[in-house]
Image (cartoon, grey):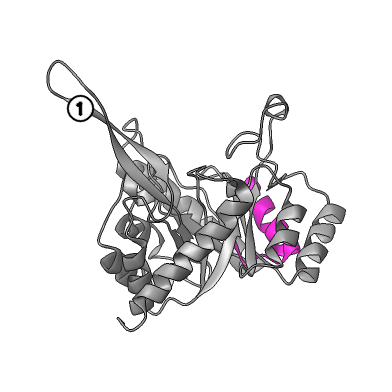
């Protein structure tokens, strides 16, 4: 199993700084957040989803792309993915992300899929997503960069089975699934091994993070407010020791990408802690396959 790190979890350092740091770790790849930072966010303290310094802009120049690519090559770090926040149906932005990924030497991008908020029927959203993916499949074939549908809460693919339903009509060489058990704490939990078996050849990448349900106030009618909060990898609801066993059982031997949002420790410590936690789980699993 190989280890990558998604730059969204290191918002207080620049991409080139992260790549240089990873050189002396057991990480061998980086996944780059791809988003425009609004001007009014740039005066804020660094944060995961607002002023994230470890982000490449869609307006990045070819010269800056080459500098970043050279930095990664010099550090023996693979630029694995470009991860934008695409809207399903936005073919222009999708193609631009594919072009950037191609220039960086990345093998995957994250695709846009419709959100689900009860305002539109699932079947209508599915049809629009299918039309988008049919176009994107040809783009991915052209650029030789695979497009990934992420299992993500508040979308039409919160679980492995719903993600599979969305991608199963397409060529797994061009369209795959980014499996994220941490997101499935919010919504979409299924037995991990069953979901992985179903995904089969569409399983393209895995993100590692964790979350936990927290009880809120109890109302006069007895109902209780519950919410999901991000948690350290070893302390949340996802049994990562089991997930790693299940990944091994289905023959998955590619990258797992760290994406810890718990903010439980400083960035550099979190980078080290997460890989050590996963390696410990793997060590504890030895002899159990």
Residue drawn at x 30%, y 50% is 188
Give above or below for 47 relative to 259. Answer: above
Is residue 224 in the magenta section?
A: no
- Whether residue 196 sits left or right of residue 143 in the image: it is left
Name of the residue lying farthest toward the top: 220
User: Which residue range is magenta in the image?
Assistant: 93-108
- Whether residue 149 sits left or right of residue 79 in the image: it is left
Q: Position of residue 123 (x, y in %)?
A: 31, 45
Q: Position of residue 42 (x, y in %)?
A: 72, 30
Q: Position of residue 251 (x, y in %)?
A: 39, 80
Give above or below for 203 relative to 33. Answer: below
Residue at the spot of label 1 = 224
Is residue 94 in the magenta section?
A: yes
Residue 176 visible in this rendered orientation of the protein: no
Give above or below for 196 relative to 189. Answer: below
**SS assignment for the magenta stretch, majority:** helix
């Amino acid at each position: 199993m190989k280890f990558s790190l998604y730059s969204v979890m290191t918002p207080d350092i620049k991409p080139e700084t992260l790549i240089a740091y990873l050189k002396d770790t057991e990480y061998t790849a980086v996944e780059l957040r791809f988003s425009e930072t609004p001007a009014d966010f740039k005066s804020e303290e660094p944060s995961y989803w607002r002023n994230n310094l470890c982000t490449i802009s869609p307006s990045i120049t070819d010269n800056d792309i080459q500098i970043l690519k050279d930095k990664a090559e010099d550090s023996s770090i693979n630029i694995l993915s470009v991860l934008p926040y695409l809207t399903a149906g936005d073919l222009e932005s999708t193609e631009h992300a594919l072009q950037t990924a191609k220039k960086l030497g990345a093998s995957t991008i994250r695709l846009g899929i419709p959100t689900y908020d009860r305002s539109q029927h699932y079947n209508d959203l599915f049809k629009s997503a299918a039309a988008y993916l049919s176009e994107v499949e040809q783009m991915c074939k052209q650029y030789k960069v695979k497009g990934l549908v992420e299992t993500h809460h508040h979308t039409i693919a919160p679980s492995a089975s719903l993600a599979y339903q969305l991608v199963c009509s397409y060529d797994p060489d061009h369209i795959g699934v980014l499996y994220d058990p941490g997101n499935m704490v919010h919504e979409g939990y299924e037995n991990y091994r069953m979901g992985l078996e179903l995904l089969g050849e569409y399983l393209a990448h895995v993100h590692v993070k964790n979350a936990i349900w927290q009880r809120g106030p109890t109302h006069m009618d007895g109902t209780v407010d519950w919410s999901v909060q991000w948690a350290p990898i070893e302390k949340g609801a996802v049994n990562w020791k089991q997930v790693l066993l299940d990944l091994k059982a289905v023959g998955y031997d590619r990258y797992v990408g760290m994406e810890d949002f718990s903010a439980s420790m400083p960035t550099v410590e979190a980078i080290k802690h997460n890989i050590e936690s996963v390696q410990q789980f793997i060590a504890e699993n030895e002899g159990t396959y």
